[in-house]
Image: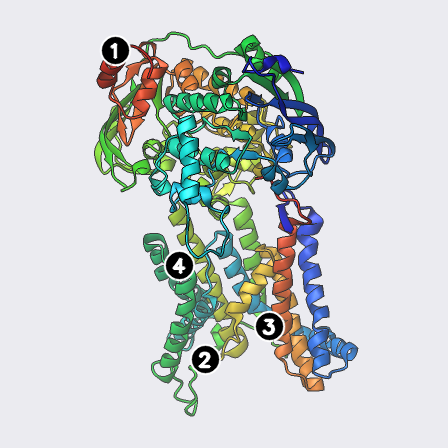
Amino acid sequence: MIRFEPRTNPSAFLVYGVPVMAAAFAIILAAIPLSLAGAPILPAYGLMISGAFGSLFSISEMLTRATPLILTGLAAAIAFRAKLWNIGAEGQLYMGAMAAVAVGSGVIDAPSYIMIPVIMLAGAAAGAMMLIGPIIMKTRLGVDEVVTTLLLNFIVLLFVQMMLEGALKDPMSMGWPQSEPIIDSAILPPLLERMRVHLGLIIALISAFALAIFVKRTVWGFEIRAVGENAAAAKFSGISVTKTMVLVAMLSGGLAGLAGVSEVAGTRGYLATDLSPGYGYAGIVVAMLARLSPIGVIISALFVASVFVGADSMSRAIGVSNYLADLIVAMSLLCVLIGGFLTRFKIHFGRQKSAG
Amino acid sequence: MSSAATPSTETSPQLLLKLAAITKRFGPLIANDAIDLDVHRGEIVALLGENGAGKTTLMNILFGHYVADEGAVMVAGADDNILATLEPGAPQAALDAGIGMVHQHFTLAENLTGLDNIVLGTEPIFRLRRDRTKARAKLDHLMSGSGLNVDLNQPVHKLTVGEKQRVEILKALYRDARLLVLDEPTAVLTPQEADSLFAILRKLAATGLAVIIIAHKLAEVLAVSHRIAILRGGKKVGEMTTDQADRRSIAELMVGRDVPISKRRERTPGAEVISLHNITIDRGDARRSLHNVSLLAREGEILGIAGVSGNGQAALAQLIAGLDRPDSGTVEIFGEPVTKFDAHQFAQNGIARIPEDRHHDGMIGSMTVAENIAIEDVRSRDYQKFGFLDFDAIRKRAEHAIADYDVRCPGPDAPARLLSGGNIQKLILARVLEKSPKLILANQPSRGLDVGAQSEVHRRLLEAREGGAAVILISEDLDELLTLSDQIAVIHAGHVSPVIAAGDIDRSELGLMMAGQKKNEHNADTRAAGGPA
């Protein structure tokens, strides 16, 4: 018989070491599909590392990929902290991108220091707006937000498609369903010359540190932690669970919306329905790997981005499917979840039963 | 040994169970330290001790849930009276040896009948038809012999708590238990139900059943047992026959020091603090509903609310805690009608709220002790500036609270989940009493606490009363209510009786009211019956 005994006070080594070991273990496990695909294993690992870190260009690519992941990771982390299961970051990202395009493609024009904050605000507001419906349904009617936010992703994607075929369609796109480009003054400038990494990275990093301070040091952060850890006790002590949930929803949706702004105004320059290869969903993985810590999100986003970029480059070089990257990320998530379980519980084998 | 303490004098006592020098360690903690205990046929032994004294560990060893590090459990055979060592760590062996347990929280399937519950697990799984005439006959025999009467054809959810307990006891007896262990059996019963349970246990003991009662209430232990064994800190610190025992010495043995007895000093109540007028809350469920309830609490007065749990106490507590609003009726605090029922407002307006379930509603385990103490006030200017928490102020308050209320914890920054039940309660007292509240809602404030922590809670409540606070004390513990309250009202099925001055009431009267009889009715009843029921 296997028995699980909760650990009351897991050590720092367990708390911080386990996610790192889990990620490393997942990379090691990737040897199995690599060998099944007939690839030489050690050179493949080498190619992955050089693909992500081998040159300034590959590092820039990795950071570009990490930028939206940090923001969607933060969106998931803050929501999950309060036990608001927002699975809709993908849709919120697209709404944010669409809002950025709507105000940033020539309707208004102003210098960069005005335009960039304007599209950021618009995007964050649009992302946050996406959670109003789910949060009302959750707090008033008890509708599970996992379902509503998840399904909204598809609605948003179809809505974006409709807009790209209609109101937002670029007349110069020669029939392609894409929006008019973001005007120059609203573009997030690259951080390095002839590299793709852009101002969005700085915005993402600032967001992460700001969120860390917010959660840890402010009254609202205190209330979010209280509601997330024990909603009944928080309510008893006089904290409004509903108000806290609304605040969390606005933060989470806003951060996911910012990810959309960053992609559309930093990386792509225009909106199309292939703007995000699932950054919203990957953000959930990033947040879980980071144990919902905002600073941890930076590190885990960098890890996930380097796996993606490294595996991409390796697969091109030796002709292995780049789905391997998804596989590694998925395995890391599973390893971290198992690792997290082991941090919280001790396992005993044997026939003793726990006290009745 | 205590062979002198046997109940039946005509036959020589036969040893049924012998626990010999049982020692159990959990890491550095010695939960049981060389404990000896003998139980004879037909004997009722009370196992007394505070929380953490080692009662539960000892019983878990008896049942094979734990394996003792040293010592042995020996049980006499059913036919030969020869003590044989029980296989350690094997619950099935304990069951086969005739040891039955009634847990404090019943283990019955609510949707099945009493009969189904009793035979469940004793019948083969694959059978073509149910033949229960035999089972029925055996149970009828058991019931008629012991007075354990209960309608076994009713689904369990329709039974009262006392009846469910009888089903549990029948279940053990049906499996030929020769030793019955009852864990805190009276915790959920009215005094009358407890008395009838004791009568049944006496009858069963007379037929040769051995009984161990795990308890922490002294009065009932003295009422029913033949012998008392007292555990403290994992050791057996005393054993005596009940007729030699007195309350005070037992209490001291349990706690290990002199227990201060809280005394209420006479005091004239002051102005009205809170009054409820014709409050009705209908949530479709008896435990969360109130019907036309009017109450009044004044400064310097403790108003006790007596009742068996699940009779609307939760609704009353939620209302006074600011967590629910009445469907009709008004609440006035200091003569002002309350328009906004909001827990935060209530707390800020000087209402101290001690929740019933301190683990579930009273603290956030992963947050620190300091944060848990300040939780009601983080929005106040004392603890935040421009929305940023003032950690120095929060920590300072916690340090004071830890010292003043003797909260045993590693420090203000330790997560609150590390605290024991008694210390969590002290933390909550520190949170709410520090602000000199005008009204205190104490919902089961000492339930599950050991004697030491209990007397601390009582002292604090009396101190607040001295200081002029109104206290509403909701409790199932009559001793607690009778020692602390100036006035007592009884809650039953959402109805609250008129308030009675504490001096004018006696226990059995209170018990009858808790069972749903009106005061005037039962006065007539007791007079007619001329004595206790």
What is the chain letter for disc 1?
B
Q: Are marks 3 and 2 on the same chain?
A: yes
Q: Are marks 1 and 4 on the same chain?
A: no
* In this view, the mark in front (3 or 1): 1
Give the Cα separation between the discs numbered 2 and 4. 27 Å
Q: Would you identify the image quadrant in which residue B408 lies? A: top right
What is the chain letter for disc 4?
A
Q: Residue type at mark 3?
A: Arg
Q: Assess disc 2: are there few (<14), some (14-19) or many (≥20) residues with their C-alpha within 10 Å of its C-alpha.
A: some
Q: Secondary structure at mark 3?
A: helix
Quarter occupied by the C terminus of chain A? top right
Q: Assess disc 1: are there few (<14), some (14-19) or many (≥20) residues with their C-alpha within 10 Å of its C-alpha.
A: few
Q: What residue is shown at x 52% (from left), y 50% (from top)?
A: A214
Give the Cα separation between the discs numbered 4 and 3. 31 Å
Tell me whether circle 2 and circle 4 mark residues in contact (CB < 8 Å). no
Q: Say which residue label 4 marks.
A: A144
Q: Nearest the camera: B445 or B21?
A: B21
Q: Residue type at mark 1?
A: Arg
Q: Say which residue label 1 marks.
A: B527
Q: Residue type at mark 2?
A: Thr
Give the Cα separation between the discs numbered 1 and 2. 86 Å
Q: Residue type at mark 4?
A: Asp
Q: Say which residue label 3 marks.
A: A65
